Image (cartoon, grey):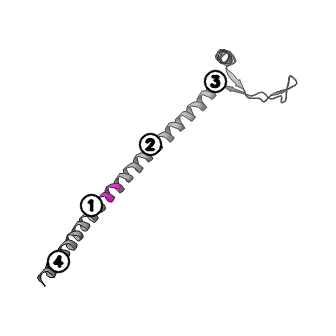
Amino acid sequence: MKLKVLLFHVLLFLIQNMHGFLLNGPTNGGKQTTGNTQFLTNTEFLQAKQVLKQDTDDLRHDMDKTFALMTSQLKSKFDLLEIKLAEVDKRNETSNGCVSMEKYLALERSKRK
């Protein structure tokens, strides 16, 4: 753990003093494989990092909006389902009342005979 912290501080010191990052690949036998050295400056790195952060924030915002919309749609569907279920329950109660009345009348008729 201490080694990682030390390595981080050394790299940070080197980056600050060089004012950039070397983008070339590995060297071959101590010699560079290409003669063209490319550096990424701190400013370019920070700009790219800022663009990525902005893209991430935009994506998070879009996901939050989508989640809110889907939640409201789901709530509407549940409310509609609850209303329909209440209507079905009322019909069942009415049907059960009719059946009970029919049984009562049939029983009354059978007793009269």
Q: Nearer the viewer, mark 2 or mark 1?
A: 1
Type of amino acid at the residue the image marks with label 4: Leu
Q: What is the CA distance from the residue labelled 2 to the residue labelled 1?
A: 33 Å
Residue 113, percent from left and from top: 13, 85
Q: Nearer the viewer, residue 92 or 34?
A: 92
The numbered disc on residue 12 is: none
Q: What is the CA distance from the residue labelled 1 to the residue labelled 4?
A: 31 Å
Task: Name the N-terminal-most of marks 4 and 3.
Answer: 3
Label 3 near label 2: C-beta < 8 Å? no
Task: Name the N-terminal-most of marks 3 and 1.
Answer: 3
Residue at the (63%, 24%) spot, across then down: 42
Which residue is the site of mark 1?
Answer: 86
Q: What is the CA distance from the residue labelled 4 to the residue labelled 2?
A: 63 Å
Residue 92, percent from left and from top: 26, 67
Which residue is the site of mark 2?
Answer: 64
Which residue is the site of mark 4?
Answer: 107
Q: Is residue 81 left or right of residue 96?
A: right
Which residue is the site of mark 3?
Answer: 42
Type of amino acid at the residue the image marks with label 3: Asn
What residue occupies the far right of the structure in this picture?
29
Q: Quadrant of residue 82?
A: bottom left
Magenta segment boundaries in residue numbering: 78-84
Residue 53, percent from left and from top: 54, 33
Type of amino acid at the residue the image marks with label 1: Ala
Q: What is the CA distance from the residue labelled 2 to the residue labelled 3?
A: 32 Å
